[in-house]
Amino acid sequence: MVYALGGGQGHAVRGAGVAAALQRRGLEAVLWISPSGRRMAEGLATDVPTNVITSHDERLPTLARQRLNQARAIVVDTFPEGVMEELSATDTTRLALLRYRRDAASIRFRRGLGACTSVLDLEPNLDWLQGVERLAPVARRIIQGADDDGSVCLIDGGDTPLAELYDKLGARLHALGLAVCRRSSTGPPLTFGRAPRVVVGPAGYNLTYELAAAGIHHLAIPRPRPFDDQGLRARAVAETFARPEALEERIVDLCLRPVPRRAPVVRSYDDVAAWVSSQL
Amino acid sequence: MNRCRETAGILFKRKCSAEAVGTCSQCHKPICQTHGRTYWQSVACVSCLRDLIKSQPQQKQSQAHLRDDPYFYWYYVDDHWYDEPYGMDDYRLFDEDGGDFGADDYSGWEGT
């Protein structure tokens, strides 16, 4: 059982990535996701059966008791305690795959962590969690071709202030003669035939490490999240800016004088599936 | 020897470290070969000529030789290029403390 409940689509992307990789290893996986992540998960893991549950559904603890106990193991993304702490009611082997959480010192998180059989840190580069196994950030491959096409891609996550900034920024870049495209991270899974040279976007886990793995320059505009800290991640992995003019200048600079990107090592979901298999 | 004090670039302001070869006839700052332009019988810096064209659009005719100058491209093609393009909401997106909210709130799951 791959438990990827949570509000954003990031959980669904990681859950689907892990579930599909487990299937490839011959293990049977069922994916638990929120309605917001359904489209994304179904686009990434077409052969994996899904169980769509609202994260704050009052029936969740009952469902968890009934169904999760039947699983050989629960692979849980980000919330080792469960989004309603409902995983405390199960005694099934629990393997946690964790990205950064700003409440890592909380009793709630620590209690969930303590109940896990094994824990794998998927963001050890942020040095936020001690005493657990460390892998590296993981990401799927989003680029099909080899060279970049010299363009600028502006990605929003259905975020109105960001979309309004992009209206102005995009018009100015276009006036300068740069090729500009707009994409949303809430649509179907992000893929590119040829890589853009520069991506401007938030600094969620998946986008950040997908771009790092592809060697695409990531100019980040961190967005506020209750459990994640996009600012921390952006400062560590991507590039951040104090004002829009500085962002604009860096975009033009990279388009006129391309330089290769230096990025951290990023692993694949097959590596995560191999770790999960080794724990069973 | 004096260094050039002009900061105007084709797109963005930058410090210039080139050696000055003269002074601007309008603002009297030292300017280098790259940042000096003929202005009637004298020489003026890029910034002063840009201000002139912006404040007195009729000067575009008398300074028509600047039309093909990359430093003046946007002043001839798009008068609005150097207007303030971004508003308060845009600047707020770049605030350092914009990311720390609801840290202890478990009720809102959107965008976890």
Image (tube, coloured by chain):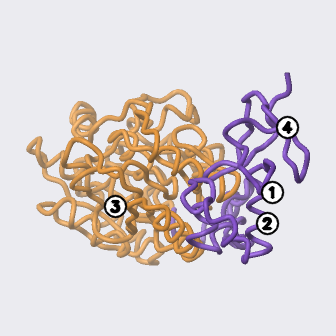
Residue A229 appears anywhere in the view: no
Q: Nearer the viewer, mark 4 or mark 3?
A: 4
| Residue that numbered label 4 is attached to | B30
**Residue for point 18% across, 52% down:** A20
Image quadrant where residue A129 sits: top right
> From the viewer's perspective, is residue A44 above or below residue B4?
below
Dot 4 lies on which element?
strand
Question: Which hue belongs to chain A?
Answer: orange
Tell me the element at label 1.
helix
N-term-proximal mark, 4 vs 2: 4
Q: Amino acid at mark 3?
A: Ala
- Residue identified by numbered label 2: B52
Identify the residue shown where x is 58% and y is 72%: B78
Q: Is residue A80 visible?
A: yes
- Residue A222: image location, x then y, percent: 59, 56
Could you say where residue B111 lies in the image, as x and y percent from the top left? 51, 66
Q: CA distance from mark 2 to mark 1?
A: 6 Å
Disc 2 residue type (three-letter): Leu
The lab-note entry on whether marks 3 and 2 share a chain reads: no
Q: Residues within 10 Å of mark 2 (few under 14, many from 20)?
A: some
**Mark 1 — on which chain does it sit?**
B
The residue closer to the viewer here, A15 or A107, is A15
The residues bearing labels 3 and 2 have C-alpha atoms spaced at a distance of 57 Å
**Residue most toward the front?**
B41
- Is B12 on the left or on the right of A258, as rendered? right
Q: Amino acid at mark 4?
A: Pro
Q: Are marks 3 and 1 on the same chain?
A: no
> What is the spatial separation of the Cα atoms under label 4 and label 1, in whole angstroms?
13 Å
Residue that label 3 marks: A12
Q: Quadrant of the C terminus of chain A?
A: top left
Supply the letter of whichever chain is purple.
Answer: B
